[in-house]
Structure formats: structure tokens, C-alpha cells
Image: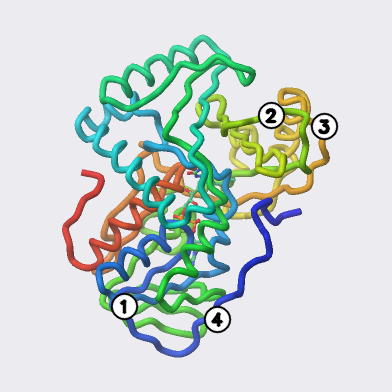
Amino acid sequence: MSAPVWEDGGWAPRPCLTGDVTADVCVVGLGGSGLTAVAELLDRGATVVGVEAGYVGGGAAGRNGGFLLAGLAHGHHRMVPVLGRERAALLYRRTLEEMDRIEAATPEAVQRKGSLRIERTADGLEDCAAQAAALRADGFAVEEYDGPEGQGLLLPYDGVLQPLARCRQLARSLAASLYELSAVLDITPRLVTTDKGRVRCGAVVVAVDGGLGQLLPELASRVRTVRLQMLATAPTHEIAVPRPVYLRDGYEYWQQLPDGRIALGGFRDRGGREEQTSSTDTSAVVQGALEQFLREDLGVQAPITHRWAASVGYTQDALPYLGQVRQGVWAAGGYCGTGNVVGALCGRQLAANALGESADYFG
Ligand SMILES: Cc1cc2nc3c(=O)[nH]c(=O)nc-3n(C[C@H](O)[C@H](O)[C@H](O)COP(=O)(O)OP(=O)(O)OC[C@H]3O[C@@H](n4cnc5c(N)ncnc54)[C@H](O)[C@@H]3O)c2cc1C
């Protein structure tokens, strides 16, 4: 049951890298962030080789909850004091623009139907009010919500995507050499080494999010690895969930797929330190909590057909890491569990930086 509910079998695997190849830029990691970096590099006229340890979208990018959310991991009201109002608003706007680009690039995989932030405590609802006030102050749409899912906020710009389909569609559209089952063992300026091949290149883009600390040990203290888990049910009409919903500021999240299945994730805090792992095995503790929530809170008794996990990167300040780690080696990650949009934005910036631009999409 470890395959995600998104797996539809429609992928022709790419070759493994063997021997020496050459490109302007080598992109390491072919999830949503790396693939966006490849696309941006191609748009800018560079030649690109992409290398992936597993399969395209085989990491968190193809195994996630499918929420397409504006903003960073923490709500806009919490980013304003950290970044300043102007910068926080600019970043929020950039994520909205990136969502539009994701939708334009892979329209069949995306549905923009808004999202619900639901809270069940007075503190949570107070936090919703602060979030709504900060968004409105900067001209971003938000509505108070009180409906069958509970009370909270409706964020109308948000949506969902079929995350694995998005990665595969993006990869198919790219005129670049993409290699699978080609784990990178070593990165030095201008040379990327896998177990069977090497890429000689002018610059390297590393987009491995939860794997950053392993591949680039100098980032291990900045970006820690955390496992997130999900389950999905058989198609059901026991409940109707018109929009993706998240609870407890995003700890729990669920959506109903077009065929009626419920896809539910969360309870990483229930797993404690055990979730600080790159293992993609599911655990009884977190899966038990998810199952209990499904049955008792959502009232869904449909059989569980899928259980899966993947690892992501978390940072201390909830801001992504993005920078030049070694001469000519640019890396990003640490999206704190919400990287579908921000990861793509970072991928774009990494591409610009790798070609020598001082672009700072986050500044
Ligand atoms: C269960 C779960 C639910 C989530 N829900 C959401 C959500 O609803 N919305 C949202 O925005 N975000 C969500 N996230 C977070 C989101 O999935 C990630 O932030 C995002 O996918 C990061 O994309 P990425 O391309 O940077 O990294 P990844 O998708 O992790 O891709 C990195 C790739 O690098 C490869 N790699 C690693 N090491 C090497 C190496 N040495 N050599 C070559 N390749 C390597 C991996 O195999 C992987 O394919 C969720 C994550 C999980 C796990």
C-alpha cells in the first residue's frame, strides 16, 4: 500500500545515467522544484541535464496532499513581522503568480477552487482573524467561513493539483536529458558524479528538499528531514468535500478526489522524533491517528486503499533555504511541508542564479 493514490501507472521510465555527459547546468532532483528549474533554464537558452535518484515525481512532489496554497508555510500575518510588510506582500504575490504558471503549464492537473482553513479552538479562530486582517490590509482576497467543515477562512485563490501527474506532464514537456535511478554521490564545482556516470557542467542546481542535508552535509543543520504521512480511501459519497480543507494550522489536511476518494494527511506531531527520518515507510502511530480521524471526525467508513509517506525539509524559521552552497552549486529546500508552489518559485530562482543572475525572487 506504499504507492500514493496519485499513481496511475502512466509513466515511461527514463534511462539511468551512464558515462560522461556535458551541459551548461546539471539539475539534481526531479520533483516539482527541480523540474521547474529545468524548464526555466531551457527558457533561458541553457542546455540542461537532470538527474534523479528514483523516478520523476517519486519524492514528496508526487506523494503529497495536492494542496496548491498561496504564501509561505506560515500565514501572511506571521510573515509580516518577520519579513516586513512590503517583502511579505511581494512574496505572497509571487506565490500567486507561480500558481498561475503551474496552472498554465499543467492545466489538466490543477483545479483552482479555493481552500478552507478550519480551526476548532478560540486561539485558532483568533489566529484566523489576524490572518484575514493581514491579507486584506495588503489587498489579498479572503472570506470568513462557517459551514459543514467548521469555522475558519476561505482562501479563494488556492486550489488542488494531482501532484504526480503535474510532475510527469512537466517532465514530458521538457526538451532536456532527464535521467532516473541515478543517485548523485558527489558534487564538486563543474562535476556531478553518480554511481555509473558523470555530468560536466558550468553550474549545479540542487533541488532535493528533504534530502539536502544528506547530499550537502553543510546544510544538515539548516534543513532537517521530516517524514509526512497520508492515507486514501476507496471512492465514497459518505461526505462531500468541495474544497481542500486543513485544520490545526495545517497539521491535518484532506481533500476529496474527483472519483470520491478521501485523501487525508497529518499528525506528524503525534509521531514525535520518529518522524525525523528519510524513511518512506509508514508508521503505526501516525497511520492510527489518521485512521481514527477519518472514522471519528470525518465520519468516513470507506475502506482504506492507500497508505504512504515521503520526506520533506523543515527549517527553524519556516523560511525556505536558498543559496550558493559551494562555488557554482546552488541549492534550495526546507519548504516546511508546503513546497508545491514555493518550491517551484525557488527552482526558478536557482535557474537564474545558476546562469549568473543575481535575481532574488525572495527579496
Ligand atoms: C505527505 C506529504 C504531504 C504534503 N502535502 C503538501 C501539500 O498539500 N501542498 C504542498 O504545497 N506541499 C505539500 N507537501 C510538501 C511538498 O511535497 C514538498 O515541499 C515538495 O514536493 C518539494 O518538492 P521538491 O521538488 O523540492 O522535492 P522532492 O519532491 O522531494 O524531490 C526531490 C527529488 O530529489 C531526489 N533526490 C534526493 N537525493 C538525491 C540524490 N542524491 N541524487 C539525485 N536525486 C536525489 C529525490 O528522489 C526526489 O525525487 C507534502 C509533503 C508530503 C510528504
Q: Earlier in the sequence, mark 3 or mark 1?
A: 1
Q: Is residue 213 visible?
A: no
Q: Is residue 77 visible?
A: yes
Judge depth for marks 2 and 4 and give the one in front. 2
What residue is drawn where x is 78% and y is 43%?
234
Amino acid type, mark 1: Thr
Estimate the x, y position of residue 186 in percent, counting from the top left: 41, 74
Numbered mark located on residue 240 in the image: 2
CA distance for labels 3 and 1: 51 Å
Q: Earlier in the sequence, mark 2 or mark 4?
A: 4
Q: Earlier in the sequence, mark 3 or mark 4?
A: 4
Judge depth for marks 2 and 1 and give the one in front. 2
Per the image, the residue denoted by label 1 is 47
CA distance for labels 2 and 1: 47 Å
Q: Is residue 22 above or below residue 45?
A: below
Label 3: how many residues lie within 10 Å, few (<14), some (14-19) or many (20+)?
A: some
Quadrant of res 301: top right
Which residue lies most toward the top here? 122
Amino acid type, mark 2: Ala
Disc 4, SS: loop
Amino acid type, mark 3: Gln
Numbered mark located on residue 15 in the image: 4
Per the image, the residue denoted by label 3 is 301
Disc 1, SS: loop
Contact, CB < 8 Å: mark 1 with mark 4? no
What residue is drawn where x is 64% and y is 53%?
6
Label 1: how many residues lie within 10 Å, few (<14), some (14-19) or many (20+)?
A: some
Amino acid type, mark 4: Pro
Contact, CB < 8 Å: mark 2 with mark 3? no
What residue is drawn where x is 26% and y is 77%?
202
Disc 3, SS: loop
CA distance for labels 2 and 3: 14 Å
